[in-house]
Amino acid sequence: MVIVATEVSEATVAAIAQQNKSALGTLSGAWFSVNAPDAPCPDGDTRALFSASRNHDAELMAAFARGDQSAARALTERHAGRALSVATRMLGETMEAQDVTQEAMLRLFRKAPDWDGERAQVSTWLYRVVSNLCIDRLRGRRSEPLDAAGEPEDETPSVDARLQQMDRAKALHAAIDRLPDRQRLAVTLRHIEELSNPEVAVVMETSVDAVESLLARGGRALRAALGRRRDDLGAME
């Protein structure tokens, strides 16, 4: 069922943008460590987002189109966290990732009057927009230095063990950052965000076979990159 509603004004969208800046700021920080135990995602892991009620998201989109600004806040709380996580893993910079997530959410809000909940899921649509925005930005800054994501905590009392764990995390993140854009996106969605191959295919607008090929090539590249540092890093799973 296509939502029929009045046009959402740019002034309304701009007001929502200002309100959501604080929400995006709250979602930053420790969120970006892939092992962070307290990542503030209201709906649980990524699979929960894909299995969450499509009707509820459609109702929120319809409510926002009718002028209920609290619906925009609810949509942000439901979906911006994982979108921000993907953007950060792709771009390696918190502020830039927040900008991308903000732009993706604004695009979502602008679509509210015409949103068809039977044809699209908010989560899938948002991942796709974030991915495309990130790829566009990456194409514009090929020569910038790599920036690893936050380090996972290690409770091992040994200083040497902690340092080695940090080196492993840096090596993995740096190796992912060096992958071609689409391989990096596939690896991020599949192994960090834990989407299934069919879900990754929907986000990337490609076939499951193509996703499997991207993952295989990305995996080989990561193993080769990390294998060259085996003596420095020790055994890695």
Image (cartoon, rainbow, N blue to C red):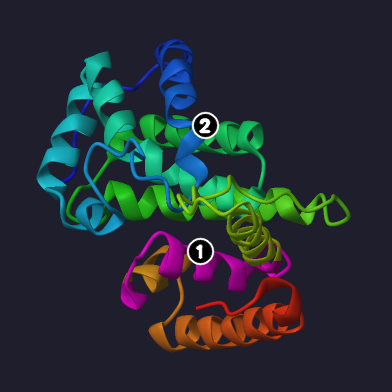
Q: Which mark is residue 188?
A: 1
Q: Name the amino acid type tagged 1.
A: Thr
* 124 and 113: which is toward the camera: 124
Of the two numbered discs 1 and 2 in the rendering, the one whose residue sits closer to the viewer: 2
Seen as rendered, the residue at the extreme front is 158
Q: Name the amino acid type tagged 2.
A: Gly
Determine whether, in the image, residue 120 is placed left or right of residue 173: left
* 11 and 79: which is toward the camera: 79
The residue at which mark 2 appears reads as 29
Residue 182: in magenta span = yes
Determine whether, in the image, residue 144 is placed left or right of residue 43: right
Range shown magenta: 175-198
Determine whether, in the image, residue 82 is placed left or right of residue 64: right
* 221 and 127: which is toward the camera: 221
Residue 206 vertical position relative to residue 105 in the rendered view, above or below: below
**Residue at image location 62% in from the left, 88% down from the top:** 220
Which SS type dominates the magenta stretch? helix
